[in-house]
Amino acid sequence: MPPAPPAGQRRTHRTGWIIGASVGAVAAIVAGVVIVGALGDDDPPTPDPTTTTSTEPDEGTPDDDVFATLSDECGAGDMQSCDDLYFAAPVDSLDETFGATCGTRTDGGNPGGCTADVGSSADLWDGCDAGDMQSCDDLYFDAPVDSLAEAFGATCGGRTDGSGAGECVAGLGA
């Protein structure tokens, strides 16, 4: 049997304190893990593989149809459709670029300005671009003043420096 403590001192139970502190520490750790786990769950829920739902329609969207129509009209020479396509299409998309270049008729330096730059002269622009010098002369005279179309006609579709504006047939032949 252990000797009795000296008078005025109490006997301490270290084992009880150690066990109590250990249980408290474990409880604190468990509580911390539960709290962090509840707050830190940023993973989206896992979808159920037995159900199939889609937010994408099977046959394109109405916007796709609108873009296709505007693109077709722009390519056919409707400059308002080119402008509309440029403004409606997603940024940096092929549709936006096609509209900005007036259906590949310009370098896209004035996006959304096809109606002003080319106007109703798209057929003349296309003819001039293909080498029809009469179309180039007509384009020069019919296009809005100081427009890209006027400059394109004046240079006979980029074949001259523009000093003989309106004289493509005379200078280069038909």
Image: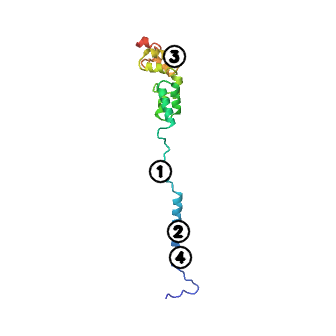
- Which residue shows up at 43% across the image and 20% down it? 129
- Image quarter for residue 155? top left
Secondary structure at badge 4 equals helix
Which residue is denoted by mark 3 in the rendering?
A: 142
In the drawing, does residue 10 fall left or right of residue 122? right
Say which mark, if any, is on residue 27. 2
Q: Amino acid at mark 3?
A: Asp
Say which mark, if any, is on residue 97. none
Secondary structure at badge 2 equals helix
Who comes first in sequence, dot 1 or dot 3? 1
In the image, residue 18 above or below residue 72: below
In the image, residue 132 above or below residue 110: above
Who comes first in sequence, dot 1 or dot 4? 4
- C-alpha gap between disc 1 and disc 4: 56 Å
Q: Nearer the viewer, mark 1 or mark 3?
A: 1
Q: Amino acid at mark 1?
A: Thr
Viewer-closest of 30 and 74: 74
Q: Are marks 1 and 2 in contact (CB under 8 Å)?
A: no
Which residue is denoted by mark 1 in the rendering?
A: 51
Who comes first in sequence, dot 4 or dot 2? 4
Which residue is denoted by mark 4 in the rendering?
A: 17
Secondary structure at badge 3 equals helix
Q: Are marks 4 and 2 in contact (CB under 8 Å)?
A: no
- Which residue shows up at 53% across the image and 70% down it? 24
Q: Residue 50 at what x, y percent from top left?
A: 45, 52
Viewer-closest of 10 and 138: 138
In the image, residue 140 above or below residue 86: above
